[in-house]
Every structure is written in C-alpha cells, then in structure tokens.
Image (tube, helix red, strand yellow):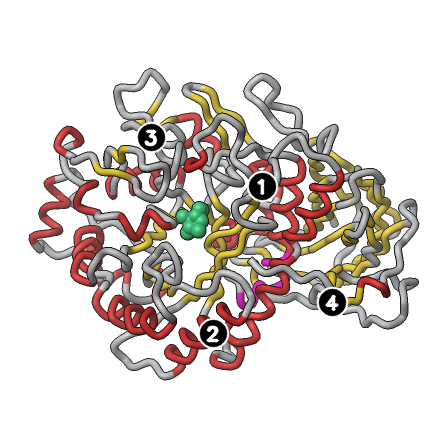
Amino acid sequence: MPRRTVLVRIPLLSRRAAGALVACAAGFVLVSATHLATLAAADTVSVSVDATKPGAKIDRNLFGQFAEHLGHGIYEGIWVGPDSSIPNTRGIRNDVVAALKALKVPNVRWPGGCFADDYHWRKGIGPADKRAATVNPDWGGVVEPNTFGTHEYMDFLDQIGSRAYVSVNVGSGTPQEGAEWLEYMTAAQPTALAKERAANGHPEPYPVAYLGIGNESWDCGGNMSPDYYVQQMKTYSRFVRNFNPAQREGSQRMLKIAVGPGGDGPRWTEWTEAVMKAWKGHQWSWDIDGLSLHSYTVIKFPPAFPSVGFGADDYSKILKATLDMDAIINTHAAIMDKYDPDKKITLVVDEWGSWYAPLPGSNPGFLVQQNSVRDALIAALNLNIFARHADRVRMANIAQMINVLQAMIITDKDKMVLTPTYHAFKMYLPFQDATFVPVTFNAGSYAHGSITLPRVDAIAAKDTAGRLWLAVTNLDPNQPADIDATIAGVTATSASGQTLTGPKVDSVNSFDAPNTVVPKPITASVQNSRISLHVEPKSVTVISVQP
Ligand code: AHR
C-alpha cells in the first residue's frame, strides 16, 4: 500500500501553531511537516463542541465485524461443535457469544475475504457427517471441514443478535451458483431450494441484509481488470437476487456492495472511477448500494512489525500509518461525489485494522497476532475518521473478529480473553446510530524521531436519547493531557465515563492476566458547563455529559 512521506495529516492544529493553516471542524487538514509547531506537552487542550450543529448519523454498521474461514477465526474461535467439552449452543461457543452480544455487533461479513472466492456453499449444508472436507487454499492449505456453513453462520448471527453480510463467490463461482445460494437462504415460496433449506432444519427464510459481490476481485478474487469486474458486477447484481419480497424493499431491503479499491494510488482511483461511472449509467435491471474499500494498517507486505514487544518507534510509525485512512477515504469519496453527489452509494470499509508479523511459532497462514494498547488507539482513531465521514462511510468491518489480525477476542481451547480493541469498541457503543456533533480542538503534536503525530484526537455525538458523548484519544505515549471543553447547545452539570490504557504501549491482555488493559471509570469536573478532563498517556476515553 503506497504511503506518503512528504505530508503528514494532523487534526486541527493549535491556534498558536504556524498560522499557515485553516482550522476545519469536519476533520483533518494537510500540513507540510516543516510547518508543524509542537505544543508543549503540558499545554491544556482546548476543545469546543457545538451541539447546535448536528451532522450526519454515525451508522451503527460502522461497528461491523469480519469473520473469515482463516486460521482459528471460525473453527475454535466460534465453532467447537456440539460434542465439545467447551460450553456451547448447537456447536457455537457460549463465552464468545456472550462477549459479542455485549458488543451489539451490527453485521458480520462472511465467509471471506479471499476465502469467499473459493467457497462453494453447497459443501456447507446438509447433515454434518455427510459434508465433504475440502482444502482452504487461501489460508495455510489446511483441511476445511465445512461443518460451519450457512445454517451455522445464521445460527451464530441469531445468537449474538447480528445481521448477515454474505460475500458471494465471483472468482471461481458462477452467477447461477450465487443465485441459487440466495434462493436457498431467502426464498419464502415453496421452491425446491426453499424445501431443501426446510429439510435441513430451517423452514423460515433467512434474512440477508448485505450481499458482497466478490472480494478483492483485483487480486485474490480473480485478478480482474476494472472493466472485467464491472461486467461481473452487473451480471451478479442482476441475477443474484434476494428471493424474499419482504427483503427487497423498505428498511429490510438487501443492499449490494461492489468490490472497490485497496488503497489510494492510480490503480485504485481507476477502479473506483470504473465502478462509479458504470453505476451512474446503470439500467433498471441492476444496481449497487455500496462500494467496498480495503485498507489495513500495515507499513509494507509481508507485514514485519511485531504485535507485542515493541517500543516508541514502532508505536509512532504504526499510528502514523493508521491515520492514512482519512486521506484514502478523501480520495475515493471525492470520486464518488463526482458521480453520486447525493451520496446514495455507501463507501463500505469492509476490511480495516492492524496487520502485523505473525506471532513466532504460529502458522503464518493463520494471521495470528497480539492486540495491545496501541490497537485500542488504532480502533478509536479509525472509528473517529469514519464518524467524520459519516455522510459517505456508513458501514465498516474490522478484520477480523476472533483470533485473526486485529481481533476482538482471542481463544485457546476453553480459554478466552477480550482484547484492548474489544474494550475500545464497547466504550464506543453510544456512538452507534448517534448524530455527529462538530468538535474543534488544538490537537498539538507528539514527535518521535522523524514521525509527528497529533497529540490528541476527539469526536462528539448525540445518542438516540439525546445525550452528548465525547471521545478523546491521547496519542502521546508519555504525557497526560488536560482537556478543557466548552459545549454549545447543551447544559453540563456533570460528566463521566470510562478510560482505557495500560502500563506500556505494547501491554496486552493474556489468559493469565486478562485485566491488564481494561476500561476504568473516569470523572470530569464541570463548572459553568465547562468540562475539565485529565486523560492518561496512550489512552482512549469516552464520557457522557449529564444535563
Ligand atoms: O483479512 C485477511 C485478508 O486480507 C482477506 O482475506 C483479504 O480480503 C485481504 O487481502
């Protein structure tokens, strides 16, 4: 993935910083590194929240997850089988379900990833003992038992209270295979496939909320050119229907998401142009609702940065890389605006998160990594970026849910631990479907070697009950920050919430020490509706304001 070295992005600069820059309530500005003025670490961070100017809805789908048949993401992470000694419900582990239920996961993308374009759904239905074992050619060449298939996925969604985002096989499948899968899942009439579904234990049609038309079709999904993919997209959009009239209109309408870019160089802008141009001229017979974007926090491939046992160098480099998300979204949102000024098409960031070197001793094809304080900050910073782009970015899926990449949960046999990323997601729950509220602040900067980062980041929103929430991330690994927040449009008498940090930038939760990085209560002092909040170094804090 290309990275810019000349420019750095920082949120609003200090009013005392070089006067070359214009503050912008909506988000980030570009500034030449040579013009950066570094705030003294002890400076108070002035924050202005304007609740009189509500922005876009922060769609709860931005908190979506991704579960691929990869390593121990599905097998062991979710599925242990009904005969396992690990407590489970119909083969799905109870501890994981309870943890995910508490996270109010809006949707789960499945079965891939690259695996989606190798997946043939028929192998994953019917009696468990009759299912053919196949090979997972994408991830370690291991045996894929197919014991977790369509019915098990739907049962899992039901247990955690989430919605289906199914990626259909475009690379090695056919429109007919895809159409039949959708008919099998969604048909309400007594068709042969609906009857087969009933015979397999589910007479009622399944709800399918989102359909992905392939995955990374420019790479593992078939190495297609933009033009070739556009033709596939039209064909799949036309024929891979939802067969249930109740899921074809209104709020239940299944949305179709096309493969989009994987970065922000010319290769990717060409892709976005091709898909959006085709959409603009689309006929009655086909349509899409979303364009996918994949963008990982990774300095280079193969990923070489360790997920644990690192210091300030790696911390700064990785946080700088994660902030690239803002520029990548800007690039593609600008192209989308050209063809779709009404913002009908959602930019769906359906693969994002940190991607580090595999843990020593693990199968490199299983993408196993630890999850530290740094990952909690990565989660918060990306969620903040998505919130600032909430008018265009209305769905996102972190990669991946369990045991793979930037996971929420790590398991080992009967043991389970919640990661710092899990806790950050949980703290951000009030932002699901909340209304964005503009925030301006003097971010200042944290400099380490040649890397300069904003010292703090912040977003605010009003939840569905009208309560105001403020999220503050302190990127500085050494210095606390004192936040001095004024709020227009809301009377504040008290403010409190939770804060998340750990002893070191690479502190993790382990099976032996699961509470090293967990949220702790925090209270701000409030005087005349002015909020003073002290946040620790390398921390994520979310508070609500009581009137
Ligand atoms: O999340 C791991 C892999 O990253 C996915 O399978 C693929 O879509 C992407 O390249």
- Measured in 3D between alpha carbons, the distance from the residue under mark 2 to the one under mark 4, in whole angstroms, is 25 Å
Q: Position of residue 210 (x, y in %)?
A: 35, 57
Q: Position of residue 89 (x, y in %)?
A: 31, 27
Q: Position of residue 203 (x, y in %)?
A: 16, 45
Mark 2 or 1 closer to N-term? Answer: 2
Vertical side of 123 occupied by 185: above or below: below
The residue where tag 3 is placed is 79
Crowd class of label 4 (few under 14; some 14 to 19; many from 20; radius 10 Å): some
- Measured in 3D between alpha carbons, the distance from the residue under mark 2 to the one under mark 1, in whole angstroms, is 29 Å
Q: Please report the residue visible at 56 percent of the width from the left and 62 percent of the height from the top.
A: 57
Q: Please report the residue visible at 32 percent of the width from the left and 61 percent of the height from the top.
A: 213
Nearer to me, 282 or 525: 282
Magenta-drawn stretch contains 48? no
The residue where tag 1 is placed is 304
Asked whether residue 412 is in view, the answer is yes
Q: Are marks 4 and 3 in contact (CB under 8 Å)?
A: no
The residue where tag 4 is placed is 29
Q: Is mark 3 within 8 Å of ligand 1?
A: no
Query: Which residues make up the magenta segment?
Result: 385-392
Disc 2 secondary structure class:
helix
Q: Are marks 2 and 4 in contact (CB under 8 Å)?
A: no
Amino acid type of disc 2? Glu
Crowd class of label 3 (few under 14; some 14 to 19; many from 20; radius 10 Å): many
Q: Please report the residue visible at 47 percent of the width from the left and 38 percent of the height from the top.
A: 367
Amino acid type of disc 3? Trp
Q: Are marks 1 and 4 in contact (CB under 8 Å)?
A: no
Amino acid type of disc 4? Val
- Measured in 3D between alpha carbons, the distance from the residue under mark 4 to the one under mark 3, in whole angstroms, is 45 Å
In front: label 2 or label 3? 2
